Amino acid sequence: MTILLFDNSYAKLASTFYRECNPTPVANPDLIQFNQTLADFLGLEDLHLERQQEVLAGNTLLEGFQPIAMTYAGHQFGHFNSQLGDGRAILLGEVIAADQTRYFIQLKGSGRTPFSRGGDGRSALGPVLREYLLSEAMHQLGIATTRALAAVTTGEEVARDQLVAGGILMRVAKGFVRVGTFEYFSARNDLSSIQQLADYEIEHHYPNAKQEENRYIALFSGIVDRQAKLIASWMNIGFIHGVMNTDNMSIVGETIDYGPCAFMDGFHYQQVFSSIDRQARYAYHNQATIGQWNLTRLAEALLPLFSDDTGDEDKDVKAAVKQAEDILNDYSKRYKDYWLAGMRRKLGLLEVYPQDQELTQELLDLMHQDQADFTLVFFYLSQDDKQAQLMALFTQPEKLAKWLEKWQQRCVLENGTEKERKAIMRSANPVYIPRNHQVEAAIRAAEDHQDFSVFHALHQVLQTPYTLQPDKEQYQLPPKPEEVVQQTFCGT
Ligand code: AMP
Ligand code: MG
């Protein structure tokens, strides 16, 4: 057996950043899924060892693991909570992977930590399966995300609305620092920790900021850019995060904390799935604006680092605020550019023309009116022989026909051939997404009948979401009326 090398940089930070905390062993762990490809990439082949499930459940700690629960705060549905932190997650350690990048390995559902407050530190099986399926699907769809390395059942039950089977997810991220981590120190006026954390992020995730005149402003600008890109990619694919609290927004720019998230079937701007999002704060169409709101909270926390010290404090603060505002205003433009670039690819457009925004908007408006299936509309558009099926998704096909004509006229302005345009479209419009009803069916079979075959089959299809696979039509289809999932739950 080779020796696993862990390089735990976060545990080297000051003790205010985390608490040491071991996972609580579970009765009888059993493997559901192990991501061998990811393990190989991380250099963790040896996790595939005898009694592997003991390690994956946190019952056995490998040499080099240094388990900690990270400290953070956060705005939850607009309200500030100054003390959150990893209540059901434990960071085990960090590895440098094949791409020379640092990856953080965490258990979710591994027992109580000093930040568990009233919670049990556990996770039900359902949310573990949901996060596994959705995060891996997002990765294969090409969207920045935390990954799933393994999922196990615990052999124990957890108390939710009723007693349900417990599960543990081993997940991997380029970083687990959140907007809420900065807010934690800001709420305590702990400027030295804010600076330490900012330096840490620059060192590990935004090294280019070091060359800039004010490295912290450059850091902020980098974070803003990655969020604009990330949220645009969600919008391009019909993904609704569901709980965009500042503690669920990652500084490194990955999709994180898959709770009641979901992909839309029928397109609707105001679509919400999460049972706890009663005001529709995190509806599909609000996501970009919420991103900016969250980044404003980050700017407030970082503000003391933006000031130059010219001796005139009033002037320095004003200048710092102005810098932050400029970057926040720029977020809207960056978001729109990323979003439109993504939509152009979906429509097979490589050149840039001023009418593209309106053209895209008109299609989305038509889809919204009929709640046409988001994924199928773009899939059919990207095929050569699916005109009839496309038309059937709309109640007023003549309106769509007019739009198709406009799109054709726009396509004429392209330099590439139709074949090239279709190839672009097929690389931007998935055939398969983790549809809500399919995810729900996988969870039901596992929770109710200890049958993981539905989960495995769905997971397999989602490995190559842009490739049409034989005999997998059922995974392309929207739910039948009786299969529609109206609400999703955190299950925490
Ligand atoms: P979330 O927004 O669902 O990611 O979680 C918000 C906060 O609640 C985080 O600090 C979590 O660690 C904590 N939390 C969620 N579920 C539990 C649980 N079952 N036990 C302890 N803490 C939890
Ligand atoms: Mg969270």
Image (cartoon, helix red, strand yellow):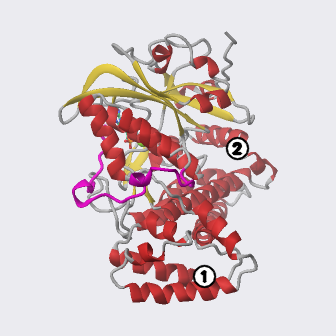
Report the disc number at residue 97: none
Residue 177 position, x and y percent, is 55, 40
Above or below, 145 against 91 in this view is below
Residue 400 position, x and y percent, is 44, 84
Three-letter code for the amino acid on which mark 1 is drawn = Asp
Is residue 474 in the magenta section? yes
Above or below, 62 against 130 in this view is above
Ligand 1's quadrant is top left
Task: Identify the residue under disc 2.
Answer: 202
Q: Which residue is more in the foreground, 456 or 309?
A: 456
- Residue 350 in view: yes
Task: Identify the residue under disc 1.
Answer: 356
Quarter location, residue 323: bottom right
Quarter location, residue 134: top left
Q: Which residue is more in the foreground, 264 or 468?
A: 468
Q: Which residue is more in the foreground, 207 or 337?
A: 337
What residue is at 29 percent from the left and 36 percent from the top?
445
What residue is at 67 percent from the left and 38 percent from the top?
200
Please give the count of numbered marks on the rendered protein.
2
Residue 433 position, x and y percent, is 46, 53
Left or right, 235 with respect to 109, comes to right
Left or right, 421 with respect to 242, comes to right
Three-letter code for the amino acid on which mark 2 is drawn = Ile
Q: Residue furthest left?
A: 162
Which stretch did the figure color magenta?
465-492
